Image (cartoon, rainbow, N blue to C red):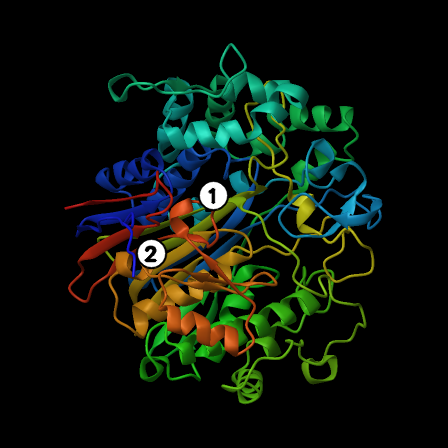
Amino acid sequence: MSTRTRWQIDREQASGRGGMVAAKTGPAAEAGVAILEKGGNAVDAAVATAFAAGVAEPWMNGIGGGGFLVAHLPKQGKTGVVDFPMMSPAGATPDMFPLAGSGHDAGLFGWPSTVDNANVMGQRSVAIPGTVAGLALALETFGTMTLAHVLEPAIALAEDGVPVTWHTTYWIGREAGTFRNRFPATAAIYLDANGNPWVSIEQTNLTKYRNPDLAATLRAVAEAGPAAFYEGEPAKKIVAHLREHGGVHTEEDFAAYRASVDPVVTVKFRDHQIHTVGKGSGGTSLAEALTMLNLIDLPALGHNSLESLHMMAQIFRQCFADRFAYLADPAHVDVPLELLLSPQYAQECVERMSMDPIGSPKPGSRVRLGVSHSMPASVPEYVHVKDGSTTHLSVIDSEGNAVALTQTLLSGWGSRVVAPGTGVLLNNGMMWFDPEPGRPNSIGPRKRPLANMAPVVITKDGETVASIGSSGGRKIQNCNAQLAVNLIDFGMDIQAAISAPRIDASTLSLAVDDRIDPAVIEGLRKLGHPVSVRDERLLTADFASPTGVRRGPDGTLTGGADPYYFPATAAGLA
């Protein structure tokens, strides 16, 4: 039998006691650590990290997007969610993106294709961003520092420049032609004088890209608060540019945006509590999956065994079936949130699963879940999922305060639109909606689209155990569930839990990491799973990309990050 070499990829675990930040870029993590060094708590550090991430990793996130934050402050007895997703403008209508008549869109979710892909790219695809409002509200509610203080690292990065690595060049290169041909204000920031992606040739003299307009926008927010963004010159410039190109956005849409502090969604998993976000988010589906997984003795079945992965895949499929059928903005649609997360419903679903070959997953019945409407599911079948633009960060400080924060522009580079004079790269959040009218997640005025983000804080007896999360669109939910299982059921440290091979059931295929035992993979095929074996070393983002921080019983903090996402970094204080 022939053999061949195998390229091994992994990442060292960071450790410390003074605080830990795990983020998807080094500059963002360093911004958070700097705030911890100055006496800030986990929320102060998380907000600083989030603002800096928007500068250092603009293809994934920024103040032109939205997200969710989970905070747990055990000594203050506070646990809550800051909800700041994107929102459709008041002028949005269910039929605002006419269907092209055939095919699926060029974006993440495989919706029916629209004319000119207008819901995927360009000015009309932009939803009202929530990041500035959300981060400011988190700081006001749970933090200790001023907005001006925590914005200092992000402003410095935008003014002085972000060092360019091969990873930066790759991400810019993916869209360089689009920037040159359609979006001159975006090209002016992210392409060099010759219209090429920025490139660093020598480690000792890294190229930097700068965004002085964004620095000015952030400085205005630092001086006058979020109103400077939503009611000041940035909003006026953004709205004028979007309307010039066919958008229905108004200055009132920006002025009316509000983030909110909501109750956390908490479910029991073994002797731990999983705290995540709810409503029309990925947290609802994650909580549903963990409620079902709590009924399976996974340690007895074995880590990544045939039996455990077969049950996991069935549970994940059930949760997606329920998600596509019922989840949406509960302010606009009747959503059976309480029943979907009930132990009784979980028991009914798990009892239907077995070690027999799988069938097609079906959502729970409207009668059982008490759903009053008869709208068809937004996605009757899984189609395809491409990689998107989301980032995650986790922070735990020396007092055990914890934050899990996931924020996004949605697609890679969002709408690709930078509003001239602002430096703000805008989301394409309208793509989150189903473009077909009459579905739970169809477009409506001032409606929040169904999001995939699912940040998690894990506690036990009120004490912080871990902060985890990931980027990766619909793949986030399956990833975060497996991270929780790795940490709680199998006692892994944080880097091992992140680096371990996973499955993903968010598409028609069941993606299976090629590091999993070949006999297990073949067994999944025989049980009817449409297995697609994926090699993560090809860096094609076939699974979600996590980061996390774990707190030991003695207060020791360890941080880990996706080994397959080059710039991801965990950094802490001794």
Q: Which residue sits at x=37%, y=67%?
A: 484
In the rendered image, which quarter is residue 327 located in? bottom right
Residue receiving disc 1: 135
Q: Which mark is residue 383?
A: none
Q: Residue furthest front?
A: 1
Q: Is residue 568 above or below residue 298?
A: above
Q: Is residue 359 above or below residue 31?
A: below
The amino acid pointed to by label 1 is: Leu
Q: Secondary structure at mark 1?
A: helix
- Mark 2 or mark 1: which comes first in sequence? 1
Q: Residues within 10 Å of mark 2 (few under 14, many from 20)?
A: many
Q: Nearer the viewer, residue 379 or 410?
A: 379
The amino acid pointed to by label 2 is: Ala
Q: Nearer the viewer, residue 348 or 356?
A: 356
Where's residue 338, x and y in %?
A: 59, 76
Q: Which mark is residue 402?
A: 2
In the rendered image, which quarter is residue 255 located in? top right
Where's residue 34, x and y in %?
A: 26, 36
Where's residue 263, x and y in %?
A: 50, 64
Q: Is residue 268 left or right of residue 555?
A: right
Q: Nearer the viewer, residue 279 or 118?
A: 118
Cα–Cα span, label 2 and label 1: 15 Å
Q: Is residue 118 left or right of residue 389?
A: right
Q: Secondary structure at mark 2?
A: strand
